[in-house]
Image (spheres, rainbow, N blue to C red):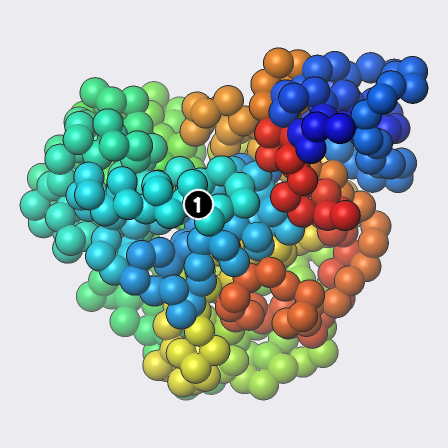
Amino acid sequence: MPADSWVIRQGRVIDPAQNIDSTLDVVVRDGVVASISNVVEAIDLPEIDARGKVVSPGLVDLHVHLRVPGQEHKESIATGTAAAAAGGFTTICCMPNTSPPLDSVEVITELRHRIERESSVRVFPVATISQGRKGGDPVDYQALAEAGAVAFSDDGDSTRNSLTMRRALEASRDHGLPVMVHCEDKPLATGAMHEGEVSRALGFPGIPPEAEEIIIARDLMLARLTGGWLHIQHVSTARGIELIRIAKAEGVNVTCEVMPHHLVMTDRWVAGDRTMVSTSELAGDPAAEGHPNTKVNPPLRTQADAEALLAALKSGAFDVIATDHAPHAADEKAKGLLDAPMGMSGLEFALPICLALVRAGHLSLTDIIHRLATVPGKLLGKGGGTLLPGVAADITIFDPDVTWRVEPNELRTMSHNTPLMGMALRGRVTTALVSGELRFGD
């Protein structure tokens, strides 16, 4: 039998793009979705029993750090994409803060060749905005787009030169590709956590929300000026998403993303608390203060910010949920909160976190699949995010009720830098197909 042909039996099929939410059979032939129907008679194809599980379009993550080239001690294409598949993501976009950065046709081309050889899911590279990702001279946007870049970003830093940002947004308008911005006023962002009552009590230097909001405001103004497509990454503050909401209402071409960890974790996690806000079911034992796995950029904010982000997600102000999967080596994170690099692993935890918000009544399964698959697939423009017959069979199957414990031997990522380590999560992917081929599961 072909390895890319299946009958997926009697799962709860949810595809927001087709307004489907029902118990159905899905037939995959030669790597594409052939049909979706109530019951398919016995046919000579291998079967996947999806009873009690959810069948959805493969999830799409617009914000992943694979650390390739040059930082393979943190993650590799093989391990990062294995983690993606285990988390249900069949398509990801990889960020350009690598060594060397993704700022030339040669580097992009070599990366794409490595992806073809080593990846277990679809990977699309994001090129830099500026040469060397230094925030100054612009890259050759047309050449990089022709080489396969799907967006431009200086992620990890904001583009310092406003004229360069203007040129990038003008190029985005011409090429139809987004400029993905990490909004951070670097001189204001010299701390290790959110600046507020918790940082003062702990004695750690803080990062004020204004460090993020100042650059959000600047980039929104430049998007208004140019008509370019601005995509604002990892929004973490209540005022930040309000600025974006106002700009959208005024017709600015802006999209934005929220991270699962900013929805349920707060600066109290840096103090050792492991309570998930907006849901009472996920809570771990208290941890040591200042654990470096709670250090992320932008930082975990206040409960009021987390609740405002969730309200914005529910209202549609956020376009997508992304992970900002940011792996680091264990010895780097062992340096302590002040000296450890910022970032946490995210690919294998996004779905369980979102499912906790579903069980708490804040979101529906359709809501999270819409933001994790349908909309990011549409924004990326590569045909993903739907189970429409005739499209590539990128399919995620997950059990929303199974409980599992976050332990190193349970993870596919090379890096285990997550404050969820040791905690019990509920909901897990059982199968991931890419063009009908099994990339995760039995």
User: The N terminus appears in which quarter of the rendering?
Assistant: top right
Provide residue 357's location: percent of width, then percent of height: 70, 48
Whether residue 134 sits left or right of residue 370 in the image: it is left
User: Is 353 placed above or below 343 here?
Assistant: above
Q: Nearer the viewer, residue 236 or 151?
A: 151
Residue at (37%, 47%) from the top-left corner? Answer: 114
- Is residue 76 among what the camera can see? yes
Residue in the image at 85% along x and 22% along y: 44
Image location of residue 112, percent across then percent down: 35, 41
Name which quarter of the figure residue 29 lies in. top right
Count of numbered badges drawn on the protein: 1
Vertical position of residue 102 compared to residue 382: above or below: below
For residue 162, which quarter of the picture? Answer: top left
Please name whichever residue, 411 or 282, is drawn nearer the observer in this view of the structure: 411
Figure check: 88 above or below 225: below
Residue annotated with mark 1: 117
Position of residue 172 measured from the top left corner of the image (x, y, whole percent): 24, 27
Q: Position of residue 394 (x, y in %)?
A: 61, 31
**Which quarter of the picture shows residue 326?**
bottom left
Determine whether the residue tagged by mark 1 lies in a helix, strand or loop: helix
Quick one: 223 or 413, which is closer to the camera? 413
Tell whether 260 sits left or right of 119.
right
Residue situated in front as seen by the camera: 388 or 214? 388
Amino acid at circle 1: Arg
